[in-house]
Image (tube, grey):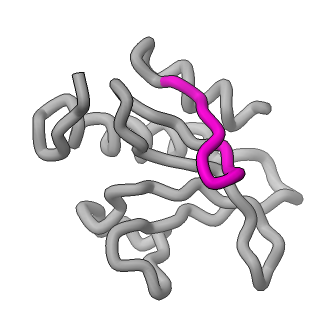
Amino acid sequence: MALRDIIRMQDNDITHELKYGMPFFCYKGKMFCYLWTHKKTGQPYIGIVEGKHFDQPFLIQEKRSRMKVMMLDAEKNLPVKRIRGIIKQALDLYKKGVIKTVR
């Protein structure tokens, strides 16, 4: 719930939807991030749909070609500043037209 609120507060055009059985966040109709848990570790993460555009060492690509994930430690406090920063950068891709939106 806290992650959902942190993400949604970043912009009024962010909507929360269920897609593929997962909680996704869209910006003007275009998917930009989602919440899920890692299959092997069971740890929660934020998936950044256009993660390939980012070089931050805390984002993990694994076998994905487009997406990167930010792993979160369920035993620690959320890194709110880092989460807000990466969400802002992801939104900027859409706002600046690097990624086209539906509207």
The front one of 18 and 50 is 18
Q: Residue furthest front?
A: 20
Magenta segment: does it hold 95?
A: no
In the rendered view, would you say 32 is above or below 2? below
Using residue 67 as the reference point, say whether residue 8 is left or right of it.
right
Q: Quadrant of residue 64?
A: bottom left
State the residue lying farthest toward the right: 75
Q: Quadrant of residue 57?
A: bottom left
- Label tally: 0
Magenta region, mostly helix, strand or loop?
A: strand
Indicate the position of residue 4 as horizontal and vertical percent values.
67, 32
> Which residue is nearer to you in this view: 43 or 20?
20
As drawn, 24 above or below 4: below
What stretch of residues is rendered in magenta?
15-23
Whole-percent x, y for residue 17 in the image: 60, 33
In the rendered image, residue 69, in percent from the top left (x then y), is placed at 52, 65
What's the residue at 48%, 75% (across, down)? 60
Rendering coords of residue 78 (x, y %): 71, 46
Q: Residue at x 12, y 45 (%)?
A: 98
Residue toward you, 76 or 15:
15
Q: Point out the image quarter for the N terminus.
A: top right
Q: Nearer the viewer, residue 5 or 57?
A: 5
Q: Quadrant of residue 24?
A: top right
The residue shown at (44%, 67%) is 68
Q: Is residue 19 above or below residue 26?
A: below
